[in-house]
Amino acid sequence: MINRKAIAVACVLVLSALALVGCGGKESGQKSGEGQQAKMETIYIGFTGPTSGGAAKYGQNCIDGMNLALEEINSKGLSVGGKKYRLEVAVLDDRYRPNEAATNARRLVQQNKTSVVFCPHSGGINALAQFNEKENFLIAGYTSSPAAEQLGNKLLIRIPTPFTWYLVEGGFIDQAMQRFGKNAVCVPGVHEYAKAWTDVFIKAWEKKGGKILGNYPVDYTSEADFYTPVSKALAGKPDVMFIGGPSEPTGLVIKQARELGFKGGFVVMDQAKQNEIERFLKMEYLEGFIGTGAVEDYATSSDYATKVGKTNKGAVVFLEKWKKRFGDKEPTSEASYHYMTMFIIAKAIELAGTYTDPKAIYAKLPAAIEALPDEQMTRVIEGISDTGGFINVTLGCHVKNGKRESFTMFAPPEYKAKKVQPR
């Protein structure tokens, strides 16, 4: 009589043996970098930002830039104290809300043991700055608001160009006034960064002899129809509109203004990007757009190359990698800045010999910037201010006759006079 139980046990043993053979074969085939990478311990870098809602694309661009850098870093492993590690971004959605950013940062530090938390909006950065020194983590703040550097926080870096630099001699306001006139109206966002930008713009515009015809703020992250505020703004017949939020809603504001007959220029906050908007809006609508330069401008601008004394290899390499990884998806400034900053943070960790001490990591940032090859630097950084800001050479763009022209802007003299070493 056949013993069914014995046969079943025998089958299980045979299958188990085959599985072990299969596993052994796979392991032996992973003695390359892939296998070694899998065995590396993980260091987490935190990110709290919008991954849902109207600013979701903005947040994802930041994350994509970070991960693109990590592909290269992790292919070799990060050496810390004689041991190899891999880096990973731990992402939490804060929906562009400061209170949720604060909650997320605490979760990232407690659960992922991260010593560095990226945040790409001023409201969230301000919220994190209330407790990050006490709770011992470094804020990598992506905001152009100069207020971030006025907090006196010794564990905070400000990554992109402060928006006040865009209004220097020859910058956004001069370009707009010379071409279109001195009467401006504002249709800005309602978030903290937009409020600060608008306040600075109005004062700078009036200081140069211009007139502000009105201010009609709207929520760029939740509204999809700006007809009413745009209509009110155009009633005074302005020469220039000051606008800006994420690229898609900003493009809708431009579209509605043009359809209502506006023929003037646009001074646009740096969050919105002309090259992103160009993808879904007629180029003729963007005539007179004055804003920040695109990533490809840094790779191709002869003006930039002449004024900084060299070509930007990092921008060229970034664009090549981006196209290979993401195809036709637009490479934004947020992506390129986060890509570069991830290399800087990784090198600072390596030089500090620790990933758990944010003060030691912060202290090595200048040395990290100096040590990185040009191919990993998508911007020319002249130093770090004593208040924690990267001193970048930046580009603006002005759409003229259907083409984007770039112009170079340096830090104001009083800013460059600050120390380039951290406190």
Image: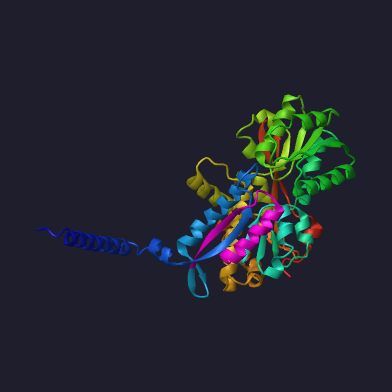
Question: Which quarter of the rendering shows the C terminus?
Answer: bottom right
Residue sticking out furthest to the front: 1
Q: Is residue 379 magenta?
A: no
Q: Position of residue 51 (x, y in %)?
A: 60, 48
Left or right relative to 172: residue 299: left
Taking the view exactly as shown, the residue that stands out farthest to the bottom is 81
Query: Could one spot residue 30 in this view of the protein?
Result: yes
Q: How is the image coloured?
A: rainbow
| Residue 218: quarter of image | top right
Range of the magenta residues? 85-113
Left or right: where does residue 335 sit relative to residue 86? Answer: right
Q: Residue at x 40, y 61 (%)?
A: 34
In this view, the residue in front, 24 or 377, is 24
Residue at the location (81% across, 47% down)?
A: 169
Find residue 244 and report its horizontal and vertical position in percent: 73, 41
Residue at 77% from the left image edge and 45% from the top image edge? 171
Q: Position of residue 267 (x, y in %)?
A: 76, 39
